[in-house]
Image (spheres, helix red, strand yellow):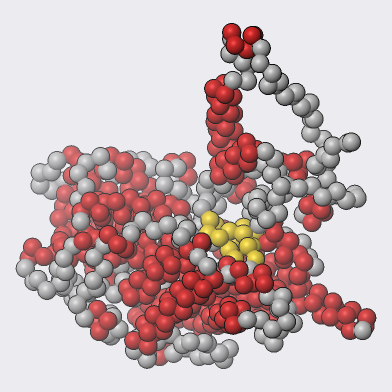
Amino acid sequence: MTRKRACDACHRRKIQCEPAHPSCDWCKHHDLECTFDREIRPRKRGVSKKPSSTRLNRPSPRAPEETLTHKLQRLEALLTDSLSTPSRAGTPSGGVSAPVSASTSAFSPSQDLVDQTILSSASGYRSCFGKLHFAGFYLGETSSYNGVPHFSATGREWIRSHSGQVPVFPAVWDDEEGDHGAPQLGREDGLPPVDGPSLPDRTVTDQYLAFFSTSHFRLVFPVLDTVLFQQTIDTAYGLGTSAPHELVAAKTCVFAFLCMVTLFEGPESPVTPPVDGDVMAAKAQHLLTVALRGEFTLTSLQTMIMLTMYQLFAGRVQSSLICLSLACRVMFMLGAHTLANPWPSSSPGSRAPKLLRKLFWLTYNFDKELSLRTGQPPCIPDEHCDLSLPPNYAQTQYLDRHMQIDPDDETMIPSLPGDLRLTLIKSKTCQLLYSAEALRKTDAELLRNIRELDDELERWRLSVPLKYRPALSIFRDVGVNKALSEAHDSVRTIVINFEYHYLVTTIHRATGRCQAWGTQSEVVPGEEMKGVSSSLALSVEASRSTLLYLRSALPVLLAPEVFCMMLFYPMSAVLTIFCSVLLDPLGPQAADDVALLNSTPEMVKNMRIKQVAKNEMLQLKLLEEFITELSRLSRCAVVEAARKQAVMNVDR
């Protein structure tokens, strides 16, 4: 009997090769040439189990110890090769690397499974992914690096079967771009040249501090106390006597501040001559390894948080995750996560505890936001923290006080980028719906958690003053509300609206993992299936609201620092709407949804309200092309569904 032979592409991926003429099923669907050019190695004969005196007197060449050593050496060699050439490991020329899905793959024996797992992990070491499910389908994973989905083989097949088109994302997953021009922490070759850790003139630093201290950004991002930071500046510029490690730590902190504050500049810099944020970040990174060898202080924590902000707002999510993890560890060492409420005290010695507590909440906010976006576990466990909010927090969050900032008043409770109560719901969402434990929950448990989180989110929404309160659903003719007409409130109002609708989408999209989708072939679906379907409909409606709100908010989206942060929300909404169109291309909302998708690339392009850096431009181009392809496929899905329905009507 002739042994079945897999083609080169299927053999490389360790998947079942379905023969067909002239190409196998995989190659045909991915427009690849189906080849059989690899060298065929003869199989080794098995070793007889019959005992002999020879085997008793000397070790067998197939002894378990030698076999294990050989396997470990083989895995080590494979891992080393993958790490040294990560760009196109295991991918045919011109093809797109795809993760192996258990539902569509036929692996070779167990050792090959280990090899494939290690190779897959090594080749994708630059990205960590969050799983994508929709209406019972596993579609793939979302990159934490750029927020763009990496569709699995089954996901691409699902798209092809509904649209009649093979999805093409060449610019999105072209590894030739590598890091897309973004300097990464620890990658000196991607950073601007550093002539030496020399600070700019003291007057430049003082001007930037004065600018930050009198702006409303100080309330939203309370990374420093002006009085305490003046002492840090004095130390950095060599005023007074300081130990060498204190001098290095202070200089690193000042560099981190200078790179961060450039994010908040408008079209014209408030300081002359302006500083280059990338150069300041590179200098801070240059000194960081030395600064972290000394004692960890409040200055160390400020440095790591400001570097996290700079990397995150510049669109370098991976670098921001590394900086954030360091910030969390320093924060734990300083005890900020269990610090008693410092707000009632007005003594001069309360400045440092108040700043430390503000830094805890800022770190906590970034940690939960990035965890929900990337699918990575959070660095800060809630059960180890004192999560009591500042006194009268809810009453002070929506006061019109942003333009009346006293630079000497450090007692003001910070606003932070969003609402901390919403951040606490994000944390619960990660734990209850997207943790490893959550993936093992039954449908009933999952739906109960979804209902509990939805109720808590609605209680939060009703607690927000009407002027700022997010709408349950946004209509297509919505106008700009009063809060958006006030520039100093606009960014925070937009962020809260985006976060609310994204949370609704994220909470209800978890129903895509329910097993009920696999049993919906019954003529009359059960109550559980009705609940699952209605929950998914809420997820899609919230995604529509995100794009419609973005359309209304564009005229007042004035703050340059939110550019890369904001890109995430339309990307998530587009993906949900796209899947909804493919699931029901002839539904009552499909035509409007396709039109909304068609208008999204232009909306994303109009979000660019400042001169963007190279990595931001590449990320913007990547998202525009990806959304354009999803828009094209959604139109094809509607046409294909209409064609199939017409054929069925003729056959009848």
Question: Which quarter of the picture shows residue 312?
Answer: bottom left
Of 293 and 435, the residue lying toward us: 435
Identify which residue is drawn at 63% across, 16% down: 61
Using the image, determine if residue 450 lies above or below residue 197: below
Using the image, determine if residue 463 lies above or below residue 185: below
- Give the position of the C terminus as an image quadrant: bottom right
Identify which residue is drawn at 79% across, 47% down: 17
Q: Residue furthest left?
A: 347
Residue 537 seen from this side:
no
Q: Horizontal and vertical percent for residue 104?
A: 71, 54
Q: Horizontal and vertical percent for residue 515?
A: 61, 68
Identify which residue is drawn at 93% across, 81% down: 651
Residue 459 seen from this side:
yes
Taking the image as shown, residue 357 lies to the left or right of residue 613, namely left
- Give the position of the N terminus as an image quadrant: top right
Of 607 and 39, the residue lying toward us: 39
> How many numbered callouts?
0
Identify which residue is drawn at 54% across, 22% down: 65
Using the image, determine if residue 342 lies above or below residue 283: below
Q: Horizontal and vertical percent for residue 628?
A: 67, 69
Question: Which quarter of the picture shows residue 385?
Answer: bottom left
Taking the image as shown, residue 35 lies to the left or right of residue 131, namely right
Using the image, determine if residue 628 lies above or below residue 6: below
